[in-house]
Amino acid sequence: VLVVTCTLLLGITTLIGGGLMIDVCLSADRVVRHMQAWRLLTSSLFHTGGIHLLFNMVALLQVGVPLERLLGSVQLSWLVATLSVLSNCLYVGLALAAGLPPLGWSQPSFQCVLGFSGVLFGLIVVHAEVAHIASYSLFGAVTIPARAYPWLLLAACQLMVPHVSFLGHLSGLLVGQALALGLLRLAMPSPATVATLESWSVVQRWGLPSSDPGATLRAMPDAGVAGAHLLPISTASHGGGLLEGLWQPYPPALVPGTPPAPPPILRTPSMSIVHQCRAGQGPEAAAAAAAAAAEARLAGTKGHGAGPRKGGPAPPPAPL
């Protein structure tokens, strides 16, 4: 929904002209001095161009899809709205604070910023916390701790694209850190509220994903599903298919909660001797009885094992 909405808004902006961007972008001066509070909501949904939109939407799909699987559509929507408003509010505060002594840097107060990047930085932090991700792998060559990854990404974005809004990205990252640490717990919906919203007919009719048990935003930093990954390691389907075996945990026989089958008990003549000794017979008598029983079984095998059975042909050999 977010991808479609942002794409449509970019199309409308292109048709109408760049004047619309001036009316919806985030400006600390316009929000505080001119009381244009709607900019706290609209600035995250609009983008400056197709390349800007493409990069943000690809990043949103990478982090948003696994988050929606864990949290459900209701909690993810709540999270995006909260990150958007709080990160933009923090941006306004930081931009105004930069103009105060001793910095005296008034330029950020009059800058106008657009884009979903600030929310994305917050989502990256929250996803690492909810999914219990310890580290990220960069092209399979470098392992980066999950807590350091957003900060390194912030520095990389600023170095590669110097004209992007550093304060906007920093604001989203800081709000995401506050959410992951549980400092903004009251801003998140309670489990009862989530259950009520997920039971609404519109959610059921659209077939939107529901949250996993225990994966609640209000319970952070203890929320989440242990061992969750960006890619699935197992599937809920018990049938065949192309993915069967590829995503199955290895080895498939070791299923948690299923005790291993006990080994079969092998009956030997020595065990028969022991049982007969316990029944009151002496060792010599028990050994003689066991030998006689073995000879009787051998004689029976020789008598009935050769030739076809009476009344029909011999049975086919068992498959290997």
Image (tube, rainbow, N blue to C red):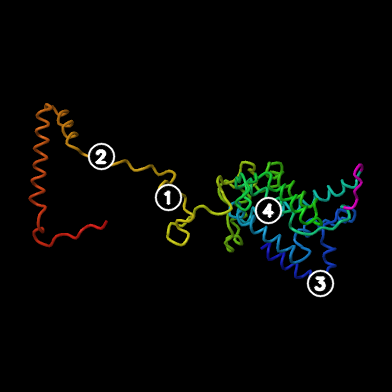
User: Horizontal and vertical percent for residue 252?
Assistant: 42, 50
Residue ID for mark 2: 265
Residue 105 falls within the magenta-colored stretch: yes
Question: Viewed as shown, does residue 162 lie left or right of 301?
Answer: right
Front residue (pair 142, 39): 142
Q: Is the magenta stretch mostly helix, strand or loop?
A: loop
Cα–Cα gap, marks 3 and 2: 83 Å
Amino acid carrying mark 3 in the image: Ile
Earlier in the chain: of badge 3 and badge 2, it is 3
Does 145 appear above or below 53? above
Tell me the element at label 3. helix
Residue ID for mark 4: 78
Earlier in the chain: of badge 1 and badge 4, it is 4
* Residues at discs 4 and 3 in contact (Cβ within 8 Å): no
Earlier in the chain: of badge 1 and badge 3, it is 3
Cα–Cα gap, marks 1 and 4: 38 Å
* Residues at discs 4 and 2 in contact (Cβ within 8 Å): no
Residue ID for mark 1: 252
Earlier in the chain: of badge 1 and badge 2, it is 1
Quadrant where the image shows the C terminus: bottom left
Tell me the element at label 2. loop
Cα–Cα gap, marks 4 and 3: 30 Å
Q: Give the range drawn in magenta.
A: 101-107
Amino acid carrying mark 1 in the image: Pro
Residue ID for mark 3: 16
Earlier in the chain: of badge 4 and badge 3, it is 3
Cα–Cα gap, marks 4 and 2: 60 Å
Does 286 appear above or below 189? above
User: Horizontal and vertical percent for residue 235?
Assistant: 49, 55
Amino acid carrying mark 4 in the image: Trp
